[in-house]
Image (tube, grey):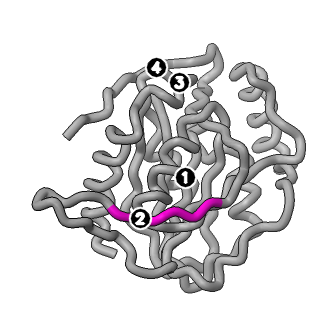
Amino acid sequence: MIKLLFMMAVVFAMPFSLYACSGDGETMKESGSRNSPDGEEETFFKNDSAFVVYYSWSGNTRHVAQRLAHLLGAASYEIRTVKAYPQDGRETAVISQEERRTGNLPEIVGDLPDLSAYKVIFIGAPIWNFYLPTPLERYMELTDFAGKTLVPFSTSMGSGQRGYLNDFNHRAQNTQEILGYKDFQFPNNYSPDAFSDAELDSVLSEWLHTLNL
């Protein structure tokens, strides 16, 4: 089992840390299985009951979400904003803090996915200043999770998990259950290729087994 490195860091002078990822926004569907120790394929979900939603800024969360969707055999949806955030983390920090302060959350590109056919929704994003990133805030503001089981995950450099989970729990509407929160820690905030697919698959597989879904 390859373990992710743990690293505590203060990224900006203000108490803000961008732990994030970005991607191309495509919805995908892949088969979800892996090899068990005895060589047989093991499938986590045998139907289309799971769905993966994620927001991405630097590449980290997208990498995790894509590997997760692959293992689950699930479709995925990437939250993208009408106005892109700057590539500079400090500039994005200032903008997102103002969005949170004023409640003027970013607009999302396109239609939101229909979740009616799914029972379990995995939702991931970077930790921004110990909270959800504002694009995910906007998505959760617009989405009713009635009767759904939500499984939150995040990417970080090692801090902010408690604040993130508390914020997530506060914003999730009408959920049946929230369980199994997992933070995936990257040693370099801006390197989505810090871990290979095989390394992430190993960590993700162990996590999925603990959920007992």
Q: Is 119 on the left-hand or right-hand side of 114?
A: left
Discs 1, 3 touching: Cβ within 8 Å: no
Q: Is residue 4 left or right of residue 107?
A: left
- Of helix, strand and loop, which one carries label 4? loop
- Disc 1 residue type? Gly
Mark 2: few/some/many CA within 10 Å (<14, 14-19, 20+) = many
Q: What residue would you read off at disc 3?
A: 191
Residue in view at x 45 percent, y 55 percent: 68
Precedes in sequence: disc 2 or disc 4: 4
Residue 104, placed above or below residue 92: below
Say the numbered circle drawn on residue 65: none
* Residue at the image point whose x is 41% and y is 45% from the top: 183
Residue 137 sits above or below residue 172 on the image:
above
Task: Please name the residue that numbered disc 2 is placed on.
Answer: 32
Give the magenta-colored segment's residue range.
28-33
Q: Quadrant of residue 199?
A: top left
| Front residue (pair 127, 84) | 84
